[in-house]
Amino acid sequence: MRTLIKNGTIVTASDLYTADVLIEGETIALIGRNLDLAADRVIDATDRLVIPGGIDVHTHMELPFGGTFSSDDFRTGTIAAAHGGTTTIIDFAVQYKGETLTQALENWHRKAEGKTAVDYSFHLIVTDLPEERLPEFKRVIHEEGVTSFKLFMAYPGVFLVDDATIFRAMTAAAENGGLICIHAESGLVIQEMVARALAEGKTAPKYHALTRPTKAEAEGTARAIAIAEMAGAPVYIVHLSCYDALLKVKHARDLALPVYAETCPQYLFLDYSLYEQEGFEGAKYVMTPPLREKWNQEELWKGLRMDDLQVISTDHCPFCFKEQKELGRDDFSKIPNGAPGIEHRLSLIYTGGVAAGRIGVNRFVELVATAPAKLFGLFPQKGTIAIGSDADLVIFNPKAEMIISAETHHMNVDYNAYEGMRVHGVPEVVLLRGKVIVENGRYVGTPGEGRFLKRATFRGDL
Ligand code: URP
Ligand code: ZN
Ligand code: ZN
């Protein structure tokens, strides 16, 4: 199958030019001006941007959490991703206490196989790491192609691991080219604050935020960086939400330490005031870290512009307002943590970033596709438009507008955190390895055609 994309504005992390793109089979075969070649399908991209498919390195499909499961599975969640111009996800497989790393991966393979609409890979959440399990790191990295791991400083009794475990994991990962991702918070201090709040009868959703202050995230971030430095390892801070934590990352990067961080659209567009709404409405925004005071947003944008933050992911972890968020109606600590977001990342970041003049269009592509591909061992197969790269492409209309709503979204969740927001810039046609999977607002692919990606080891030469 040959597809010719005509007359689009090609945007990569570094280039911006008008050209045609010839796709042969699954990969890009030729890029040039006025290509007059036979093709099975010609797509007119006049007045459109042609960008690499988005890569969302932080998703949770069907994640068991707080007595329930996140409401998107690998089919619904990746169809929603495709609608939003994301063609690769990296989801988090969970190792539970007593399980081997391999068992955890097998469980997640079973969840995903035959269902996914876009290409996918896994990070491994490690919760149990006795000395004898360390050799498994090597096998998982080199044989399974799972080259990144997440460790939690939060959620005591569920995911939290101690500093010795983090140090052990960082050392083992670094020896084998792995990258450790850290959920950075003072988990035990937060546990104490939560218990105090509940003892005082403070049960409303806003207390989720008030018991997880920015200082707790900053402390975790600084500690993660210090442990990584002692282990001689790189570290990637997930879902960074606030200026206090950003300062720790910035300081480390100024010292040339291999420290990287992502933020998410919710921390750029939504803020603490949403928890102060009437009744239980604030539960929709109970996620960890919580939404912060609004002034943090501009600091995060600055961090994105100045490369103190390298990636924008979604931390897509949806729970329905009815029945799932309801589990915490009388106790904020029982509200499942997480919010939906996989579908609108590109449109939101184009709107708040490029259209609003905060970042350029090359930086936009870098944040949502190229840097994630480089950091997580997928470049140059993914994350760019180049001869030989997978033809994961988005024909993006920068002039089109859309109003985000749960009534029209494709995620399997009964609310949208951005309900009513007008965005500029809409993915119109989405191709996965040369095949159109979204056009005319419809998913036209076949669930299951998404392929598992074995990833390369961490190189750090961003
Ligand atoms: O609230 C969140 N972020 N839920 C998902 C789990 C995590 O910590 O990433
Ligand atoms: Zn987390
Ligand atoms: Zn997460």
Image (cartoon, helix red, strand yellow):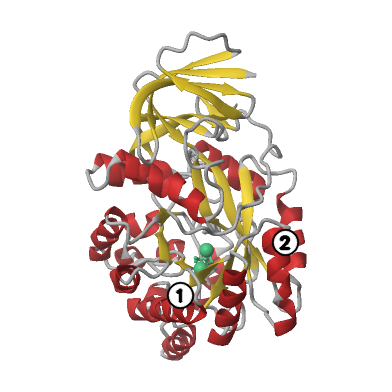
Q: Which mark is residue 352?
A: none
Can residue 421 be seen in the rendering of this structure? no
- Residue 224 screen position, x and y as percent: 45, 77
Give the quarter of the figure containing the C terminus. bottom left
Height in image: 138 above or below 420?
Answer: below
Give the quarter of the figure containing the N terminus. top right
Height in image: 101 above or below 187?
Answer: above
Q: At x 47% / y 32%, what residue is drawn?
A: 394
In front of the other: 413 or 28: 28
Residue underneath mark 1: 184
Give the side of residue 457 with respect to residue 212, left or right. Answer: right
In front of the other: 438 or 87: 87
- Residue 13 screen position, x and y as percent: 38, 41
Q: Which mark is residue 105?
A: 2
Give the side of residue 18 with respect to residue 88, left or right. Answer: left
Labels 1 & 2 near each other (Cβ < 8 A):
no
Height in image: 321 above or below 407?
Answer: below
Q: At x 38% / y 54%, what residue is drawn?
A: 265
Secondary element at tag 2: helix
Q: Around disc 2, counting alpha carbons within 10 Å, would you say few (fewer than 14), some (14 to 19), or many (20 or more)?
A: many
- Residue 105 screen position, x and y as percent: 72, 61
Q: How many discs mark residues in the rendered view?
A: 2
The residue under label 2 is which amino acid type? Leu
Can residue 411 be seen in the rendering of this structure? yes
Instruction: Give the quarter of the image for residue 70.
Output: bottom right
